[in-house]
C-alpha cells in the first residue's frame, strides 16, 4: 500500500527498465550495457559514476537512441521520458525530442563542435529546429544564450577554432540548454578541461540547472563533482548499476564492494602520505563477461554465490545494491576512514 | 589490438633509444629486424581480413603462374610470330576459345603469352620509379634545405607534364622498345614516389632516435636506410602496388597510341590497338585483351587497397 | 592571402621553364623533324636548308632553345612550325574544347562519386559499401580508351542514341564525358568514402544528432561540408587527371581538344607547338590547383585563418 | 558481412562482363572477306567535273549540305604552306591550278590554262582561259599568275619549282611565256603541283594576307574553320570556270578514327568518309544506304634493302632474290589491305604510261629457301624499319611471320613517318638501316617514277642504289623523244630493277576507296589521296 503511494508520489522524468546494449563487431560481441534500470525524478541530479569502459556513455547515448547501428544493438523493456515512450517513437518524433526535451553535453569540447559552422549558427540551429521562430530570431536567441554562458554575444560569428577549450565547452552547454530541456545528460563535461576552468564550468552548470529546473544525469568518474552537484549517485560497473542511492547513502553508507574500492582508491586529502589502494585487476573483457557478478573476479569478498545471476537488493527506499553477499548473514564491507 | 601495437611500438622505439645511447652493442638493425617481423605478421593478419584483397592476391598469383607457364607451353616462333592468314577472324570456338585475330593467330595464346609483357612493364617501371623516386624523396626529406628544394622543383617539372604526353615524348625521343617503355613509365612516376617518400620522412626526421643515431656517429646512408626508410615503408609499399596498376594502364595507353612494345609481341595494349579496327565485327579481339588489362589492374588496385588498410589500421577503428 | 597567391604564382615560373626545356630537348632528341614532314617529295637540299632557316631550326639545340626561351620569357610562345600560326592562338582555340570535356567529366565524376561515396560510407561494411567500392575500383582499372570504344559500340552503334564523336551539340559531350568521368569517379568515390567515414566518426555529428538534427541534415549539412574539404584537395589533382586523360579520350571520340593537338604536334615534330601546348597545359593545371587551394580556404575556416595570418 | 562483400564483388564482375558482352554481341554475323580479284568495278562517279553536271532543274532534289569526314586535320588554306593531303583536298575546292591531272583519264590537262605550247624544252607558252572569276569578283589574268609565281619563289615549300624558271614574260592579259634554266619536256606537270594554286593579286593588294589567301577561282568559297573540328565552304555563286555546284555547303569534318568515321556515316552524320577500314568495305557494299567508291591505286608499296649498308647480308643480290621469291604477296595483301590491293609484279606502278607488264619474280618458297641457304641467311636476325602507318605495320608484321618460315628472324621498329624519311634519306653507310618498308606514289610522269627513288641523285633513293648504268638509262630515257624507244628503255629499267638488282621487292598497289552514302556522286579519287570533291552532290529522294 505504502509502496504504491510512494510510486505515485514519484514524478519521474526518466524511467528505464532492463536496458541492454551490445556491439556486434568482427572481434566478437561487446556487451556494453546489461539489463540496466534507472529512474530519475524531475528536477533531480543524478551522478553516474564508474571507470572508463563501464558503459556510462553508451547508456547516455542509448537514452537518446543515438547508439550507432550497426554495430550497436539496443534492447530495452521500457524507456520513458516524462511519461512518453521513447522506444516506440518514430524517427521524426525522436528528432523532436532530442535537443528539446533531452540534451547532451559531450565529453570533449574540442571535437564536439562542427569546425565549419560558426558557434552562433550551431546554437541557433537547435533553437530553429525546435521552436517556432524565424532563423533571425533563432540567431538572436543564440546570442543571448552565448551571453548566458558567459561569452560576449559578438563572438557568435566566430568559428570553433577561435575559442579556447573552456569557452568551447560553454558553447556546447549553450547548445544543450538552448531549448531548455527537461533532462540534460552531461558526459564528463569537465574531464578535458583545466582544473580552474573545470570549476567555472561546473558553477555555470549548477546555476543554469537551478535556473531552468533541469533534471541532470552527470556522467563522471570524479566523485568530487558528484558530491558537489548531484542529489543521487549511481555506480556503474561492466554495463550495469551496482549501487544507487542518495549522496548520503552511497558516500556514507557504502554497500557495494566496488563502490568501496572506488572510495579507497581516492587520495586522502587529510592524509596525503597515506598509500592509495587501487582495485586489483582490470575491468573484465566486455566480449566475455564472467557469469554472475562481473566484479566477482576482483572482489575481495567474492564467494561461490557470486556466480549466480545478481538481483537488486533494497537497503532502504532510496538505496539499492546489486550484490549477493548481503544474503550472507552479517555481511558488511570495510571502508577506510577518511 | 591497436592500442597494443602502438604501445609496443613506442616501447620498442624507446628501447632503441636506450640501446643507442647507453651501449651500442645491440645494433639497431637487429631491433629493426624484430620490429619488421612483428610488423609483417600484423600486416598479414590485417590483410587477410579483407576478402577483396585476398581475392586480389589469389588472382595475381594465378596471373603470374599463367605468365610463367605460358612461356613453357607456347613457342615464341611458331605460336606468336607465325601467322595463319587462312584462319583469320575465327570467332571463339572450342579450338580457339578466344577466336583468332586478323593474322589467324590464336587470341587465347596471345593473351596468355602477353601476360608477361604487361606484368614486366608494370613491375619493372614501378621498380625504376620506386628506387629512383624514393631515394630522391628520402634524400630530400632527410637533408632538407637546398637539396630538398632542388629535388622538389625538378619533380614538379616532371609531375607537371601530363603523364601520357611525357610518355609519348620520351618514347618518341628514344625509340620504340620495351626497355624504353619501362623507363618512360618509370620516369613518369618518379615524382609521385619522391613526394610520398619525402612526406613519410618529414615527421621522422627530427625524432629523437634519429638524432641519437646521428650523434653517435652513424653515417647518413646508414641512418637513411636503417632508420628513416623503414618508417617510410608503408606508404611506399601501397604506392608500389597502385603504381603497378597505373603503370600497366599507362603502358596500354601508349601501346594504344602505337608507341608500345614492338610487334609481334602480344602486349595487351598493342593487341587492343590492333583489334580496334575490327571492333565492330570481331569485338572479341578487343574484348579479351581489354578484360585482361582490367583484371590485372583491378587485382593490383584491390591489393593496394587491402595493403593500405592493413598498414594503416586507423581506418579499421 | 594575396601575398600567398603571388608567391605560388612566382614559384610556378621555374617549373614552367623546366618543363619547356625538358619538352624541347626531348623533341629534339626524337628522330625525324618537321622539315622532312613538310618538304615536297622532290625537294632539293638547298630548299631544305632554306626551310630550316625559315623555321628557325638552324643551329644547335641549345642555341635554338635559348632563342626560343628569349621569346618565351616575353610571353611569346612562337609560331607553330607546321601550321604557321601563333601557338598561343592555336592553343586558346582548342583549350576551351578540352576544358569543356574536362569539366563535363568532372561533373559526371562528382555526380557518380559523391552519392556513391556517401552511400558507401553511411552504409559502411554492407553490401552497398562493397558494391560501390568494387564499382569504383572497376572505373579506375578500366583502360579509358577501351571503355570509350565499348560505349561507342553500345550507344552510338547498337542503340544509335548518341553521336560517336565530334563536337556537335550537347549530345556529343555525353559519351566522352561519361568515359572520362567514369575513370575519375573511381578515385573520387574512394576519397569521398574515406573522407566521409572519417567525418562520420566525429563527435560533432553526435552533437548535431543530439540537437535533434535529422539524419539527412546531419549527412548533407554537417558531414558533407566537412567531408568536402579533403575531396576538394583531390579535386585539383582530379582535374589534372581529367586533362591528362582527355588526351586519350579526344583520340577515341574525335574531340578537337588541345590534347589531340599536342599529340599531333609531337608526332609532327612541331617543337614550338608541342612545347607551347605543354607549357600552357602545365600552367593551367598548376593554376587550377592553386584555385582549388583557395577554394579550400573558403570551405574550411581554419585554413582561411592560417592564410590571413 | 564478409560474405556480402564477396557477393558484391562477384556481382560487379558479372555485371561488367554482361555489359561488355552485350556491346559485342554482334560478332556472330559472318562477314566474308572479299578476294583481291573482286574489286575491279569502279562505282559510278560523276563525269568529268569540268564539262558536265549542270544543275538539273525540276524534279531532282539535292542535299543542301554535304559533310566529308577526313582522317587528318586541316590546318591551313594557304596552298604554299603545306603538302599535306587534307589541306590540299580543301584547297582543291577553293583554288585552281594552271594544269591539273584529269582524274578520269589520268592525263595532264589545263585547268586555268586553256592550252599550252612547248616552244623549246626550255621555253614554254601558256594561254589562260578567258573570263575566269575569282571569289572577290575580279577576272583572272597573267598578273595573277606572275604574282603567284613571285610569292612561290619566296616560300620554301615551292621555291624548288620556281628555281627552274629563269624568266617570266607577259605577252598579253591571258598569255605568258616561261623560260627555263634547263630543258624540261615535262614542265606542264610542274604547273600541276597543288601548292602552285593561282592566287588573286588584287586581293593581296586590298586585303590582309590571311583573307586574301582564301580568294581563289574554285567553285567553293572558304567559310569557316574551327581548328581540329571542321572547315566549311559555301558554293561560289559567281563561279565561271566550273558550274555552280548543286550542293550549297560543303563541310570537311575531322574524325581521326576510321571506325568512328564509319559509324558517323552510318548514323547519317556525314555523307562521305575518307579511307574506310578494309573491314568495313563489305558493310559499305552490302548496305542499301551506303556505297563503296573505289579506284585502282597508284601507290607502290615495297620491302626495300639498304644497298650501302657495309656489313649486312642485304647487299648480297642472292639474298635479295631470295626475299623476292620468298614473299607470298597474296597473303600480304590480305593481311595488310584485306585483299583490296593489286599485287605488283613490276617495280613500276600499273596504269602509268610506259608500264610494261613484265613477269617479275614469282612466289616460290622452295627456291627462296634454297637461295637463303645458299647465301647463308638462314638463322640470321635482321632489322626492319617502317613508319607507324597502319598498312605498313601490318605488312611488317606479316613479312616478319613469312620470313620466320625460312628461319630468318626479323625485328621490327615502327617510327614516325618523318623520322623514317630522315633515316632513309641519310647516308646509307652509316644509317644502320637494313630493311625497310615504304611506298612511292609517282603522281606525275614516268621519269619521276624512276629518278626519285632509283637515280643516285634521287631525293627518295631510300635503297641508296648507286648504279651508273641505271643512272645513265634513266637520264637517256627522259631525253628520248621517240616514245617507242623510250618505252623500251623503261621496260629494260623495270626488268633490271625488278628481277636483277632488286633494290626493293614490290608488293602491291592498294585500291583507293571512299565510303559514301547512296546518291553521292562527283567524288573523284586521286592516287596521291588528294581526292577531288569539287562537283560532289547527293541526290535525295522524297
Image (cartoon, rainbow, N blue to C red):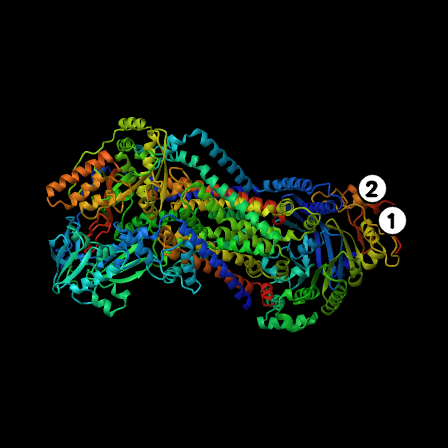
Q: Nearer the viewer, residue C60 or A249?
A: C60
Q: Badge 2 sits on which subunit?
A: A
Callout 2: few (<14), some (14-19), or many (20+) C-alpha neighbours within 10 Å? few
| Residue D325 percent location from the top left of the image | 26, 31
Residue C300 seen: yes
Callout 1: few (<14), some (14-19), or many (20+) C-alpha neighbours within 10 Å? some
In this picture, is D315 found above or below A203?
Answer: above
State the residue position of label 2. A303
- Which image quadrant: the N terminus of chain A? bottom right
Q: CA separation, marks 1 and 2?
A: 14 Å
State which quadrant residue C103 falls in: bottom left
Q: Badge 1 sits on which subunit?
A: A
Q: Nearer the viewer, residue A245 or A160?
A: A160
Q: Are marks 1 and 2 in contact (CB under 8 Å)?
A: no
Residue D15 seen: no
State which quadrant residue B34 falls in: top right
- Asked which secondary structure carries label 1, the reply is loop
State the residue position of label 1. A332
In-image side of C298 versus C106 (left or right): right
Q: Nearer the viewer, residue D231 or A225?
A: D231
Amino acid at each position: 500500500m505504502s509502496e504504491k503511494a510512494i510510486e505515485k508520489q514519484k514524478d519521474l522524468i526518466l524511467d528505464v527498465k532492463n536496458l541492454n546494449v551490445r556491439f556486434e563487431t568482427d572481434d566478437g560481441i561487446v556487451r556494453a550495457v546489461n539489463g540496466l534500470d534507472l529512474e530519475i525524478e524531475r528536477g533531480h541530479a543524478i551522478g553516474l559514476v564508474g571507470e572508463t569502459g563501464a558503459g556510462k556513455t553508451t547508456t547516455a547515448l542509448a537514452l537518446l537512441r543515438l547508439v550507432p547501428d550497426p554495430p550497436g544493438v539496443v534492447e530495452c523493456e521500457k524507456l520513458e521520458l516524462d511519461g512518453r515512450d521513447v522506444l516506440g517513437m518514430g524517427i521524426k518524433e525522436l528528432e523532436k525530442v532530442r535537443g528539446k526535451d533531452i540534451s547532451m553535453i559531450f565529453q570533449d569540447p574540442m571535437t564536439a563542435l562542427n569546425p565549419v559552422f560558426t558557434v552562433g549558427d550551431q546554437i541557433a540551429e537547435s533553437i530553429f529546429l525546435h521552436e517556432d521562430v524565424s532563423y533571425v530570431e533563432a540567431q538572436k536567441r543564440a546570442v543571448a544564450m552565448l551571453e548566458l554562458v558567459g561569452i560576449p554575444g559578438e563572438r557568435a560569428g566566430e568559428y570553433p577554432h577561435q575559442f579556447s577549450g573552456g569557452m568551447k565547452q560553454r558553447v556546447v552547454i549553450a547548445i544543450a540548454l538552448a531549448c531548455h530541456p527537461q533532462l540534460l545528460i552531461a558526459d564528463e563535461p569537465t574531464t578535458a578541461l583545466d582544473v580552474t576552468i573545470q570549476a567555472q564550468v561546473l558553477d555555470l552548470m549548477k546555476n543554469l540547472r537551478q535556473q531552468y529546473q533541469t533534471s541532470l544525469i552527470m556522467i563522471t568518474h570524479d566523485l568530487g563533482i558528484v558530491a558537489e552537484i548531484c542529489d543521487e549517485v549511481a555506480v556503474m560497473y561492466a554495463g550495469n548499476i551496482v549501487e544507487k542511492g542518495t549522496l548520503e547513502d552511497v558516500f556514507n553508507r557504502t554497500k557495494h564492494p566496488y563502490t568501496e574500492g572506488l572510495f579507497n582508491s581516492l587520495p586522502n586529502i587529510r592524509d596525503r602520505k597515506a598509500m592509495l589502494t587501487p582495485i586489483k585487476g582490470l575491468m573484465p573483457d566486455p566480449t566475455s563477461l564472467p557469469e554472475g557478478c562481473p566484479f566477482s573476479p576482483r572482489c575481495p569478498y567474492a564467494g561461490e554465490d557470486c556466480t549466480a545471476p545478481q538481483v537488486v537488493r533494497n537497503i532502504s527506499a532510496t538505496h539499492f545494491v546489486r550484490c549477493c553477499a548481503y544474503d550472507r548473514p552479517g555481511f558488511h564491507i570495510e571502508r577506510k576512514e577518511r | 589490438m591497436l592500442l597494443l601495437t602502438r604501445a609496443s611500438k613506442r616501447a620498442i622505439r624507446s628501447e632503441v633509444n636506450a640501446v643507442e645511447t647507453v651501449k651500442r652493442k645491440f645494433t639497431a638493425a637487429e631491433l629493426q629486424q624484430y620490429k619488421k617481423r612483428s610488423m609483417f605478421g600484423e600486416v598479414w593478419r590485417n590483410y587477410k581480413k579483407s576478402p577483396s584483397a585476398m581475392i586480389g592476391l589469389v588472382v595475381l598469383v594465378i596471373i603470374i603462374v599463367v605468365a610463367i607457364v605460358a612461356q613453357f607451353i607456347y613457342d615464341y616462333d611458331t605460336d606468336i610470330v607465325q601467322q595463319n592468314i587462312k584462319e583469320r577472324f575465327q570467332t571463339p570456338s572450342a579450338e580457339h576459345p578466344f577466336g583468332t585475330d586478323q593474322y589467324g593467330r590464336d587470341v587465347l595464346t596471345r593473351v596468355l603469352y602477353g601476360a608477361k609483357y604487361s606484368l614486366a612493364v608494370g613491375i619493372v617501371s614501378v621498380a625504376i620509379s620506386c628506387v629512383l623516386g624514393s631515394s630522391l624523396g628520402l634524400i630530400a626529406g632527410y637533408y632538407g634545405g637546398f637539396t630538398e628544394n632542388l629535388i622538389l622543383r625538378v619533380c614538379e617539372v616532371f609531375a607537371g607534364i601530363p603523364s601520357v604526353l611525357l610518355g609519348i615524348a620520351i618514347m618518341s625521343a628514344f625509340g620504340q622498345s620495351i626497355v624504353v617503355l619501362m623507363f618512360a613509365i618509370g620516369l613518369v612516376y618518379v615524382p609521385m614516389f619522391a613526394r610520398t617518400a619525402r612526406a613519410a620522412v618529414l615527421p621522422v626526421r627530427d625524432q629523437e632516435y634519429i638524432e641519437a643515431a646521428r650523434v653517435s656517429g652513424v653515417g647518413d646512408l646508414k641512418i637513411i636506410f636503417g632508420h628513416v626508410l623503414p618508417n617510410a615503408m608503408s606508404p611506399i609499399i601501397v604506392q608500389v602496388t597502385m603504381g603497378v596498376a597505373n603503370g600497366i594502364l599507362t603502358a596500354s595507353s601508349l601501346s594504344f597510341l602505337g608507341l608500345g612494345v614492338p610487334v609481334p609481341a602480344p602486349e595487351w595494349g598493342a593487341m587492343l590497338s590492333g583489334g580496334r579496327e575490327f571492333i565492330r565485327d570481331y569485338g572479341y579481339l578487343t574484348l579479351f585483351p581489354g578484360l585482361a588489362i582490367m583484371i590485372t589492374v583491378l587485382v593490383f588496385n584491390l591489393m593496394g587497397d587491402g595493403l593500405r588498410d592493413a598498414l594503416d589500421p586507423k581506418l579499421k577503428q | 592571402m594575396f601575398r600567398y597567391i603571388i608567391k605560388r604564382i612566382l614559384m610556378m615560373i621555374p617549373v614552367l621553364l623546366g618543363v619547356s626545356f625538358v619538352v624541347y630537348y626531348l623533341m629534339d632528341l626524337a628522330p625525324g623533324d618537321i622539315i622532312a614532314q613538310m618538304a615536297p617529295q622532290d625537294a632539293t637540299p638547298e630548299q631544305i636548308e632554306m626551310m630550316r632557316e625559315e623555321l628557325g631550326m638552324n643551329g644547335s639545340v641549345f642555341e635554338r632553345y635559348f632563342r626560343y626561351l628569349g621569346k618565351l620569357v616575353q610571353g611569346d610562345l612562337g609560331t607553330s612550325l607546321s601550321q604557321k600560326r601563333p601557338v598561343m592562338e592555336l592553343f586558346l582555340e582548342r583549350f576551351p574544347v578540352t576544358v569543356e570535356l574536362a569539366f563535363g567529366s568532372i561533373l559526371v565524376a562528382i555526380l557518380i562519386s559523391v552519392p556513391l561515396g556517401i552511400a558507401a560510407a553511411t552504409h559502411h561494411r554492407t553490401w552497398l559499401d562493397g558494391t560501390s567500392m568494387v564499382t569504383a575500383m572497376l572505373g579506375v582499372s578500366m583502360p579509358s580508351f577501351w571503355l570509350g570504344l565499348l560505349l561507342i559500340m553500345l550507344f552510338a552503334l547498337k542503340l544509335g542514341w548518341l553521336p560517336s564523336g565530334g563536337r556537335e551539340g550537347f549530345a556529343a559531350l555525353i559519351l566522352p564525358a561519361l568515359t572520362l568521368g567514369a575513370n575519375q569517379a573511381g578515385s573520387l568515390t574512394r576519397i569521398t568514402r574515406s573522407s566521409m567515414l572519417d567525418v562520420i566518426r566525429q563527435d560533432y555529428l553526435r552533437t548535431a544528432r543530439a540537437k535533434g538534427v535529422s539524419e539527412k541534415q546531419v549527412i548533407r549539412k554537417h558531414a558533407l561540408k566537412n567531408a568536402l574539404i579533403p575531396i576538394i584537395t583531390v579535386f585539383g589533382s582530379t582535374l589534372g587527371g581529367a586533362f591528362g586523360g582527355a588526351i586519350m579520350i579526344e583520340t577515341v571520340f574525335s574531340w578537337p581538344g588541345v590534347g589531340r593537338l599536342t599529340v599531333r604536334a609531337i608526332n609532327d615534330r612541331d617543337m614550338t607547338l608541342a612545347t607551347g601546348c605543354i607549357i600552357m597545359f602545365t600552367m593551367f593545371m598548376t593554376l587550377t590547383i592553386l584555385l582549388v587551394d583557395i577554394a579550400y580556404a573558403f570551405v574550411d575556416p581554419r585554413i582561411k585563418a592560417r592564410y590571413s595570418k | 558481412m564478409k560474405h556480402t562483400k564477396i557477393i558484391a564483388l562477384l556481382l560487379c564482375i558479372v555485371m561488367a562482363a554482361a555489359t561488355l558482352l552485350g556491346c559485342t554481341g554482334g560478332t556472330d554475323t559472318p562477314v566474308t572477306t572479299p578476294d583481291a580479284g573482286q574489286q575491279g568495278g569502279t562505282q559510278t562517279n560523276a563525269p568529268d567535273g569540268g564539262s558536265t553536271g549542270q544543275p538539273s532543274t525540276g524534279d531532282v532534289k539535292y542535299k543542301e549540305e554535304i559533310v566529308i569526314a577526313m582522317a587528318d586535320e586541316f590546318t591551313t588554306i594557304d596552298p604554299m604552306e603545306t603538302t599535306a593531303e587534307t589541306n590540299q583536298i580543301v584547297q582543291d575546292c577553293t583554288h585552281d591550278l594552271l594544269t591539273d591531272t584529269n582524274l578520269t583519264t589520268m592525263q595532264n590537262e589545263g585547268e586555268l590554262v586553256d592550252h599550252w605550247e612547248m616552244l623549246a624544252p626550255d621555253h614554254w607558252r601558256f594561254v589562260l582561259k578567258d573570263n575566269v572569276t575569282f571569289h572577290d569578283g575580279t577576272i583572272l589574268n597573267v598578273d595573277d599568275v606572275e604574282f603567284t609565281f613571285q610569292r612561290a619563289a619566296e616560300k620554301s615549300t615551292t621555291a624548288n619549282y620556281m628555281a627552274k624558271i629563269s624568266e617570266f614574260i607577259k605577252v598579253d592579259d591571258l598569255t605568258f611565256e616561261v623560260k627555263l634554266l634547263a630543258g624540261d619536256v615535262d614542265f606542264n606537270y610542274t604547273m600541276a603541283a597543288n601548292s602552285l594554286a593561282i592566287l588573286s593579286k588584287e586581293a593581296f593588294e586590298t586585303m590582309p594576307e590571311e583573307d586574301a589567301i582564301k580568294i581563289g577561282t574554285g567553285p567553293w568559297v572558304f567559310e569557316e574553320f574551327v581548328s581540329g573540328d571542321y572547315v566549311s565552304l559555301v558554293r561560289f555563286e559567281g563561279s565561271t570556270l566550273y558550274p555552280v555546284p548543286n550542293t550549297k555547303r560543303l563541310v570537311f569534318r575531322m574524325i581521326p578514327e576510321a571506325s568512328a568515321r564509319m559509324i558517323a556515316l552510318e548514323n547519317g552524320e556525314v555523307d562521305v568518309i575518307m579511307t574506310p577500314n578494309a573491314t568495313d568495305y563489305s558493310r559499305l557494299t552490302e548496305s542499301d544506304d551506303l556505297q563503296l567508291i573505289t579506284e585502282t591505286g597508284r601507290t607502290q608499296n615495297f620491302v626495300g634493302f639498304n644497298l650501302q649498308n657495309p656489313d649486312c647480308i642485304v647487299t648480297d643480290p642472292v639474298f635479295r632474290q631470295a626475299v623476292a621469291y620468298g614473299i607470298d604477296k597474296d597473303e600480304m595483301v590480305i593481311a595488310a589491305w584485306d585483299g583490296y590491293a593489286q599485287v605488283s609484279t613490276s617495280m613500276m606502278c600499273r596504269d602509268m604510261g610506259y608500264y610494261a607488264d613484265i613477269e617479275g619474280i614469282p612466289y616460290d618458297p622452295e627456291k627462296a629457301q634454297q637461295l637463303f641457304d645458299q647465301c647463308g641467311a638462314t638463322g640470321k636476325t635482321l632489322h626492319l624499319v617502317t613508319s607507324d602507318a597502319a598498312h605498313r605495320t601490318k605488312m611488317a608484321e606479316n613479312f616478319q611471320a613469312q620470313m620466320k618460315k625460312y628461319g630468318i628472324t626479323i625485328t621490327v621498329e615502327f617510327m614516325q613517318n618523318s623520322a623514317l624519311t630522315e633515316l632513309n634519306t641519310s647516308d646509307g653507310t652509316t644509317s644502320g638501316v637494313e630493311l625497310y618498308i615504304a611506298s612511292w606514289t609517282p603522281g606525275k610522269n614516268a621519269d619521276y617514277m624512276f629518278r626519285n627513288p632509283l637515280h643516285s641523285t634521287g631525293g627518295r633513293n631510300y635503297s641508296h642504289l648507286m648504279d651508273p648504268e641505271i643512272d645513265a638509262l634513266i637520264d637517256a630515257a627522259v631525253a628520248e623523244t621517240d616514245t617507242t624507244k623510250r618505252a623500251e628503255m623503261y621496260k629494260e629499267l623495270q626488268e633490271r630493277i625488278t628481277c636483277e638488282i632488286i633494290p626493293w621487292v614490290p608488293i602491291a598497289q592498294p585500291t583507293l576507296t571512299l565510303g559514301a552514302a547512296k546518291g553521292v556522286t562527283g567524288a573523284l579519287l586521286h592516287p596521291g589521296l588528294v581526292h577531288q570533291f569539287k562537283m560532289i552532290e547527293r541526290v535525295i529522294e522524297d
